[in-house]
Image (cartoon, helix red, strand yellow):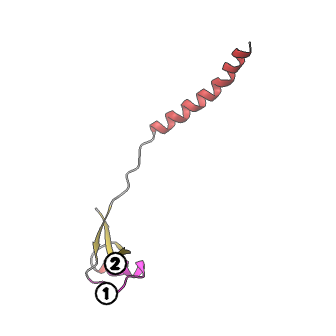
């Protein structure tokens, strides 16, 4: 009789685990946009502000830009969705 009550107690737990597994399998991964980077041709000096970099990149027909470390210096890289 004790064995039967253990099986009855384990049944809801098993159903919950199966439900969680089925939910995870049914989700589709969301694709994230890939960004292409190109070093700015018009930005002069050391890049300390990504906002300033983004403004310069907009003059180069890019939607945005960011400062990135390139060796020992920080340079402005313009970015767009590939």
At mark 2, the secondary structure is strand
10 Å crowding of disc 2: few (<14), some (14-19), many (20+): many
Taking the image as shown, residue 64 lies to the left or right of residue 41, namely right
Q: Does 20 sit above or below residue 37?
A: above
Q: Does 75 sit above or below residue 33?
A: below
- Furthest residue to the bottom? 45
Percent position of residue 6, x then y: 69, 20
Percent position of residue 14, x then y: 60, 27
Residue at horizontal 42 percent and vertical 43 percent from the top = 28
Residue at horizontal 37 percent and vertical 75 percent from the top = 69
Residue 18 quadrant: top right
Quadrant of the rendering where the C terminus is positioned? bottom left
Residue at horizontal 42 percent and vertical 79 percent from the top = 51
Asked if the stretch drawn in magenta spans residue 60, the answer is: no
Instruction: Count the labels in the image.
Output: 2
- Furthest residue to the top? 1
Q: Does 82 sit above or below residue 16?
A: below
Which of pointers 1 and 2 lies earlier in the amino acid sequence? 1
Residue at horizontal 33 percent and vertical 59 percent from the top = 34
* Viewer-proximal residue among 73 and 49: 73
At mark 1, the secondary structure is loop
What residue did someone put label 1 on?
44
Magenta extent: 42-56
What residue did someone put label 2 on?
76
């Amino acid at each position: 009789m004790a064995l039967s009550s253990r099986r009855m107690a384990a049944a809801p737990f098993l159903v919950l685990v199966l439900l969680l597994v089925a939910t995870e399998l049914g989700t589709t991964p969301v694709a994230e946009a890939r960004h292409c980077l190109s070093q700015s041709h018009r930005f002069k000096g050391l890049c300390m502000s990504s906002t300033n970099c983004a403004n310069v990149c907009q003059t180069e027909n890019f939607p945005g830009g960011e400062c990135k470390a390139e060796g020992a210096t920080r340079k402005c890289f313009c970015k767009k969705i590939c």
